[in-house]
Image (cartoon, rainbow, N blue to C red):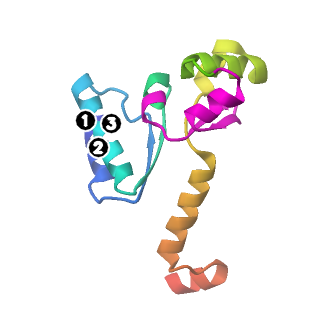
Amino acid sequence: MRQKVALAGALVHDPRLIILDEPLTGLDALSARHVKGLLQERVRSGCTVIMTTHILEVAERMADRIGVIASGRLVAEGTLAELRQQNGQNDTSLEDMFIALVDTRGGRGMSAAADLAWFARHEIRLAWREWLAMMTGGRRGAEARHHRR
């Protein structure tokens, strides 16, 4: 129930940027499906959604762009097709690809799963810049600080 209330609070004001950490954790199957549908609807309407998840199947089905973080470092980023092509694994699941990436680049095997987060790194920067420009009317630096007063 707490997760549902937190999600409702985050979405009620119709933000253009939504950042969610493990939004499906603790939800029953029906609620999780509703949340996934709602997030996909928000993306179709032009909203940016950045979501972390340890559930690789969710990332595989929902994400337009995927970033793999292992041991605090971004080890891969792109669309699912781009990641498959970059790693020479055209017909593999995201889970298999993650394990291969972590084994060859992270060197820690499955223990790196605890470090996994999915997000589009450059999209965060772009979304942050867009939000900052929107909040400051496009002003930067001292001009933006002066405008807020």
Circles 3 and 2 in contact, beta carbons < 8 Å: yes
- To which quarter of the image does residue 111 belong? top right
Q: Is residue 149 visible?
A: no
Measure the alpha-carbon separation of dots 3 and 2: 5 Å
Q: Answer with left or right where residue 108 lies relative to residue 2.
A: right
Q: Is residue 133 magenta?
A: no
Q: Position of residue 130 (x, y in %)?
A: 53, 66
Measure the alpha-carbon separation of dots 2 and 1: 6 Å
Q: Answer with left or right where residue 1 lies relative to residue 89.
A: left
Say which residue label 1 marks.
34
Name the residue: 50% across, 25% down. Answer: 54
- To which quarter of the image does residue 86 belong? top right
Name the residue: 58% across, 65% down. Answer: 129
Measure the alpha-carbon separation of dots 3 and 1: 6 Å
Q: Amino acid at mark 2?
A: Leu
Q: Answer with left or right where residue 141 lies relative to residue 25.
A: right
| In the depicted structure, whether residue 102 falls above or below residue 59 | above
Circles 2 and 1 in contact, beta carbons < 8 Å: yes
Q: Amino acid at mark 1?
A: His
Q: Position of residue 116 (x, y in %)?
A: 59, 28
Q: Which residues are magenta?
A: 60-89
Which of the numbered marks, if any, corresponds to residue 36? 3
Say which residue label 2 marks.
38
For this rendering, which residue is in front, 100 or 135? 100
Circles 3 and 1 in contact, beta carbons < 8 Å: yes
Q: Is residue 88 magenta?
A: yes
| In the depicted structure, whether residue 77 falls above or below residue 93 | below
- Please identify the quadrant where the N terminus is shown: top left
Q: Position of residue 93 (x, y in %)?
A: 54, 19
